């Protein structure tokens, strides 16, 4: 028996269809990510005199972004910017097929089993969208910190992603991120 009915409800609730590209598995790739705060409230700090001055939750968010690479060896975040009410990141996820080849060296059986187990876990994560999995953990860590420390905070339910298709596009995105603080007054997310 299924909980989905013909009236568009799932478990008696309306659901917004996914905005993710149905033709992409969100495993390996380069992504431009924007995550907004709930109601676009400026929880992360303010921009004054042309620089981002982070609040406590902004500084913790920065620490969490810096930690992503150590928690996920197949991910890099080469550039990011925390803004008063949103975060921009470029996230690079190593292709799972390359990862499996790297993690399965010719070695003793116990190492090979561990490598295969890691590869299997990556495949499970890919099934539900590895990118979403990683960003959910990041958002959860920031939210938990805010709640434990009595800091008012909330994220927008979803995030915006763009699959970066070539080096020119990546260069334009990097320039946009680097200039985001300077362009805050004209930013569409300011307000």
Image (cartoon, helix red, strand yellow):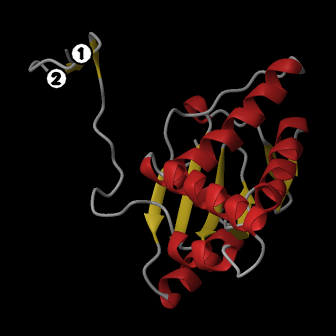
Q: What quarter of the picture does the N terminus occupy?
A: top left
Q: Which mark is residue 137?
A: none
> Of helix, strand and loop, which one carries label 1?
loop
Rendered image quadrant of residue 102: bottom right
Q: Nearer the viewer, residue 102 or 6?
A: 102
Above or below: residue 163 compared with residue 165: above
From the top left corner, tell me how far across and down residue 100 is, in percent: 59, 72
**Dot 1: few (<14), some (14–19), or many (≥20) neighbours within 10 Å?**
few
**Dot 2: few (<14), some (14–19), or many (≥20) neighbours within 10 Å?**
few
Above or below: residue 124 compared with residue 137: below
Q: Is residue 134 toward the left or the right of residue 15 in the image?
A: right
Q: Which residue is mark 2?
A: 8
> Of helix, strand and loop, which one carries label 2?
loop
* Residue found at x 73% / y 67%: 109
Q: What quarter of the picture does the C terminus occupy?
A: top right
Q: Is any atom of residue 34 visible in this view?
A: yes
Q: Nearer the viewer, residue 168 or 114?
A: 114
From the top left corner, tell me how far across and down residue 60 is, in percent: 87, 42
From the top left corner, tell me how far across and down residue 110 is, in percent: 77, 62
Rendered image quadrant of residue 73: bottom right
Rendered image quadrant of residue 90: bottom right
Q: Residue furthest left?
A: 6
Q: Which residue is mark 1?
A: 3
* Residue found at x 68% / y 67%: 74
Instruction: Measure how far apart labels 2 and 1 are at the Cα level.
Output: 11 Å
Q: Is any atom of residue 190 visible in this view?
A: no
Q: Is residue 47 toward the left or the right of residue 167 in the image?
A: right
Q: Which tag is nearer the camera, tag 2 or tag 1? A: 1
Q: Is residue 84 toward the left or the right of residue 158 in the image?
A: right
Comes first in the chain, label 2 or label 1 = 1
């Amino acid at each position: 028996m299924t909980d989905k009915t013909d009236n568009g409800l799932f478990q008696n609730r309306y659901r917004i269809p996914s905005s993710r590209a149905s033709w992409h598995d969100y495993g390996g790739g380069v992504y431009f990510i924007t995550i907004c705060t709930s109601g676009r409230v400026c929880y992360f700090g303010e921009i004054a005199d042309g620089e981002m001055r982070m609040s406590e939750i902004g500084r913790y968010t920065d620490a969490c972004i810096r930690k992503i690479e150590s928690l996920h060896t197949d991910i890099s975040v080469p550039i990011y910017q925390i803004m008063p009410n949103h975060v921009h990141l470029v996230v690079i996820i190593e292709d799972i097929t390359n990862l499996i080849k790297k993690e399965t060296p010719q070695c003793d059986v116990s190492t090979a089993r561990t490598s295969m187990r890691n590869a299997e876990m990556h495949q499970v994560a890919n099934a539900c969208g590895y990118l979403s999995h990683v960003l959910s953990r990041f958002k959860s860590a920031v939210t938990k910190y805010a709640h434990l420390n009595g800091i008012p905070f909330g994220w927008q339910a979803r995030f915006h992603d763009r699959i970066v298709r070539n080096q020119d596009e990546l260069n334009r995105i990097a320039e946009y991120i680097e200039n985001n603080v300077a362009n805050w007054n004209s930013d569409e997310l300011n307000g």
